Image: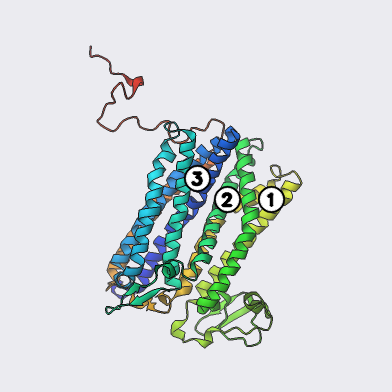
C-alpha cells in the first residue's frame, strides 16, 4: 500500500509539518526577547523590583522556547538535501549565501550573548547584562530578517539570472535581499510575533489575576500586554492590508484564492465572507457575500474590475479551499485581538483593568490565538504560492528529489512520533512554569544550577563553600 503513496505529497506534508512546529517557537521568542529587554530596561531606569521579578520569571520560559526553536529549525535544513535536492541545486547560488548570512550574523549574535543573558546576572554588571539582553533581542529580529528575505525572494524573485545549468544566480544582491514583498512581510511577521507574545503574557497575567487580583507582578504583566495588544493590533491590520495590496500586484492568483474569486468581475467584485469553495466546479457554494466590497478593499473603488481564477490556466491555481479558510482564520483572530485591545482600554478608562473578570477570561482564551493566527497566515502564504516553489519560475513538482513513497512515509511517521513526544513535553513544562504565579524575589535560572561538571571536583579557590576536607 505504501508504494501507492505520492512521494511529492508526502514530502510537502513533511516539510509543512516540521515548519508548523518550528514557526511557533521563533514567533514567541522574537517577541519574548524584546519583552525581556523592555523589562530589564525598566528595572534599570526605575529600580522597581517587580520588573526584575518579571524578567526572571519569563527568562526561564524564554530559554526553553528558544531551545525548542533551534532544535526544530535544524531538521528543516536537512530536508532541503533529502527531499528537495533539485530545489536546493537550482536556488542554492541565491538562497545559500543568505541562509549562511543568517547563521553567521544573527544566530551567532544570539548564541554569543545568550549565555550571558541566561546565566550572567551575578557575574557581569547590570548594564553589561542589559547589553547582552539587547543583543539577543536584536539577534532574534535579525534572524527573522534573513529568513523572511529568503522566503520573500521565493515569493517575488528579483535580481537574479540563470546559468547554463539552469541555476538561479545572483546579479543584484540588493534587489534579491530587498525584493518587492520583503518589507511588507517583515513588518507583518514581526508585528505578529509581538502580538503573539503579548497574548501569551496577557493570558498568564489574567490567569493569575483571576486567582489573586493583588499580585503586583501579575498586574504589571497584564497591563503591559494589554497596552501592546491595544496599540499593535490596529497597526497589524493596516500592515496586513498593505501586504495584501502588494500580494495582489505580484501574486494575483494567491489573492484570488484568498478572496474566493473563481470568476472575474468586470464591474466590481463582492467580498465573500463565508462559503464552501468547490475547486472542481470553480465556484463558492452557499456564499455569504457583500456586493462590490472586495473591489473597494483591494482597488479602493466599488466598480473596479478584479480578475478571477478563470483568467488563469487550471494548472496554475493554488488549492483554493485551504487558502480561503486559512485566510479567514487569520483575519477573524485579528479582529478578536483588536476587540481584546479595545476592551482593555475601556477597562483601563473605567479603572477596572484588574477587577473585570470577563476581560481576564477573554484574555486567557485568547492566549493561543497568536500561534494559530501565525500558522494560518503562514499556510495562506505558502499554500497560496502553489504550484510553485519559486513563484512563476520553478514548480513544486520540479523541485523534489527522486523520492520513493515508502521512504518518505517512514521518515514522516518518525517525525510525527518524535515531535509530538519531545515537543509536547517541552510545551507541558512551559505551561507548568506559567501556572506558577510570579512572586517577589524570583530566582531566575541561576540558583540550583550544577556547580561542577561530572567527574570534576571544584578546587577550594573556585568554590570556597565546598572546600576539600582532609581524609581521616
**Relative to 8, is 139 above or below?**
above
Determine whether the residue tagged by mark 2 lies in a helix, strand or loop. Answer: helix
Q: Are marks 1 and 3 in contact (CB under 8 Å)?
A: no
Q: Nearer the viewer, residue 200 or 281?
A: 200
Residue 350, percent from left and from top = 76, 46
Residue 82: give its label: none
Mark 1 or mark 3: which is in front? 1
- Sequence order check, earlier mark of 2 and 1: 2
**Relative to 55, is 70 above or below?**
below
**In the rendered view, does 177 fall on the left or right side of 342?**
left
Determine whether the residue tagged by mark 1 lies in a helix, strand or loop. Answer: helix
Q: Are marks 3 and 2 in contact (CB under 8 Å)?
A: no
Q: Nearer the viewer, residue 391 or 287?
A: 391
Determine whether the residue tagged by mark 3 lies in a helix, strand or loop. Answer: helix
Residue 22, percent from left and from top = 42, 57
The residue singled out by tag 2 in the image is 198
The residue singled out by tag 1 in the image is 344
The residue singled out by tag 3 in the image is 431
Q: Specify the quadrant that holds the N terminus.
A: bottom left
The residue positioned 57% from the left and 47% from the top of the image is: 201
- Sequence order check, earlier mark of 1 and 3: 1
- Marks counted in the figure total 3
Q: Nearer the viewer, residue 281 or 466?
A: 466
The residue positioned 23% from the left and 14% from the top of the image is: 471
Residue 337, percent from left and from top = 63, 57
Q: Nearer the viewer, residue 113 or 75?
A: 113
The residue positioned 58% from the left and 32% from the top of the image is: 49
Amino acid at each position: 500500500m505504501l508504494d501507492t503513496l505520492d512521494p511529492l505529497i508526502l514530502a510537502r506534508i513533511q516539510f509543512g509539518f516540521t515548519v508548523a512546529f518550528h514557526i511557533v517557537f521563533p514567533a514567541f521568542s522574537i517577541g519574548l526577547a524584546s519583552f525581556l529587554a523592555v523589562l530589564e530596561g525598566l528595572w534599570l531606569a526605575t529600580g522597581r523590583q517587580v520588573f526584575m521579578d518579571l524578567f526572571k520569571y519569563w527568562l526561564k520560559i524564554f530559554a526553553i522556547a528558544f531551545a525548542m526553536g533551534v532544535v526544530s529549525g535544524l531538521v528543516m535544513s536537512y530536508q532541503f538535501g533529502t527531499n528537495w535536492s533539485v530545489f536546493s541545486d537550482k536556488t542554492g547560488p541565491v538562497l545559500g549565501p543568505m541562509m549562511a548570512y543568517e547563521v553567521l550574523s544573527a544566530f551567532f549574535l544570539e548564541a554569543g550573548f545568550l549565555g550571558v543573558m541566561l546565566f550572567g546576572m551575578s557575574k557581569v554588571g547590570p548594564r553589561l547584562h542589559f547589553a547582552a539582553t539587547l543583543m539577543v533581542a536584536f539577534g532574534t529580529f535579525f534572524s527573522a530578517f534573513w529568513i523572511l528575505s529568503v522566503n520573500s525572494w521565493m515569493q517575488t524573485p528579483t535580481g537574479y539570472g540563470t546559468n547554463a545549468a539552469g541555476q538561479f544566480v545572483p546579479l543584484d544582491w540588493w534587489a534579491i535581499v530587498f525584493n518587492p514583498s520583503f518589507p511588507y512581510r517583515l513588518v507583518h511577521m514581526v508585528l505578529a510575533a509581538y502580538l503573539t507574545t503579548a497574548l501569551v503574557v496577557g493570558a498568564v497575567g489574567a490567569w493569575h489575576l483571576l486567582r489573586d487580583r493583588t499580585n503586583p507582578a501579575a498586574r504589571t504583566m497584564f497591563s503591559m500586554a494589554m497596552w501592546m495588544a491595544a496599540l499593535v493590533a490596529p497597526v497589524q491590520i493596516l500592515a496586513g492590508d498593505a501586504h495584501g495590496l502588494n500580494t495582489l500586484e505580484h501574486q494575483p492568483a494567491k489573492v484570488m484564492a484568498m478572496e474566493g474569486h473563481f470568476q472575474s468581475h468586470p464591474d466590481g467584485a463582492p467580498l465573500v465572507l463565508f462559503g464552501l469553495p468547490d475547486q472542481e466546479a470553480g465556484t463558492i457554494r452557499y456564499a455569504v457575500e457583500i456586493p462590490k466590497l472586495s473591489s473597494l478593499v483591494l482597488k479602493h473603488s466599488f466598480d473596479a474590475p478584479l480578475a478571477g481564477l478563470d483568467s488563469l490556466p487550471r494548472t496554475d491555481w493554488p488549492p483554493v479551499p485551504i487558502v480561503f479558510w486559512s485566510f479567514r482564520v487569520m483575519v477573524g483572530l485579528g479582529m478578536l485581538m483588536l476587540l481584546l485591545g479595545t476592551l482593555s482600554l475601556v477597562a483601563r478608562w473605567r479603572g477596572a483593568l484588574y477587577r473585570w473578570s470577563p476581560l481576564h477570561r477573554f484574555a486567557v482564551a485568547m492566549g493561543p490565538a497568536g500561534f494559530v493566527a501565525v500558522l494560518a497566515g503562514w499556510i495562506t502564504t505558502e499554500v497560496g504560492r502553489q504550484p510553485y516553489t519559486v513563484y512563476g519560475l520553478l514548480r513544486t513538482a520540479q523541485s523534489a528529489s527522486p523520492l520513493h513513497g515508502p521512504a518518505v512515509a517512514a521518515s514522516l511517521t518518525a517525525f510525527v512520533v518524535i515531535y509530538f513526544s519531545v515537543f509536547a513535553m517541552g510545551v507541558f513544562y512551559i505551561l507548568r512554569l506559567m501556572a506558577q504565579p510570579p512572586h517577589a524575589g524570583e530566582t531566575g535560572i541561576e540558583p540550583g544550577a550544577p556547580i561542577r561538571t561530572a567527574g570534576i571536583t571544584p578546587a577550594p579557590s573556585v568554590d570556597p563553600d565546598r572546600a576539600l576536607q582532609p581524609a581521616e
